[in-house]
Amino acid sequence: MLQGLLAAAALCAGIVGPAQAQDAVSGGHAGFIKSVQGQVLIVNAAGQSQAAQAGSTLRASDRVETDAQGAAGLVLRDGTTLVVGPASRVDLRDYRFDSTTQDGNLLVGLLRGSLRMISGLLGKAHPEAVRVETQTATIGIRGTDFIVSAEAP
């Protein structure tokens, strides 16, 4: 699984910086899909799904699901980068970011699979406002680049 995540991270080598991420995403959107490998779905709060593709927008209540060969690179408005590995399910449970004050919060739920996170402006300015939840633990983020893995229940 870790090899798949590292391969997915390689897809994101051309990730844009925070300013470009903010310019590319407008009004109520949390971010966008930067890259896709294999089958990746975006599932909204109503349970409707669509195939993800580079440029697809994400809302704070969306779920990203990958198949066994799938992976996706996501960029949030503050420049936070999420690399979702194969056979993963990740929820954006809460995301708010004020580009003027750099205040907000980020709560990501990793239900299964693997996730690499590289902190953006929010995590650097307010690390206490960034958290990742798994089925068994909540992780407060203090670093800027880490990998989390969760087995399916």
Image: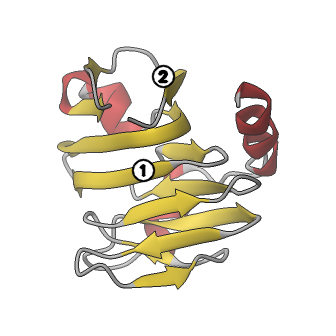
Q: Is residue 99 visible?
A: no
Q: In screen coordinates, is 38 left or right of 86?
A: right
The residue wearing badge 1 is: 90
Q: Is residue 9 visible?
A: yes
The residue wearing badge 2 is: 144
Residue toward you, 52 or 22: 52
The spot of residue 50 in percent (x, y) is: 51, 84
The spot of residue 41 in percent (x, y) is: 54, 72
Q: CA distance from mark 2 to mark 1?
A: 19 Å
Crowding at label 2, few (<14), some or many (≥20) Cα neighbours within 10 Å? few
Q: In screen coordinates, is 115 left or right of 76?
A: right
Quick one: SS at disc 2?
loop
Crowding at label 1, few (<14), some or many (≥20) Cα neighbours within 10 Å? many
Amino acid marked by disc 1? Val
Residue toward you, 39 or 25: 39
For the point 48% across and 22% down, the residue is 144
In the picture, the quarter occupied by the C terminus is: top left
The spot of residue 125 in percent (x, y) is: 29, 29
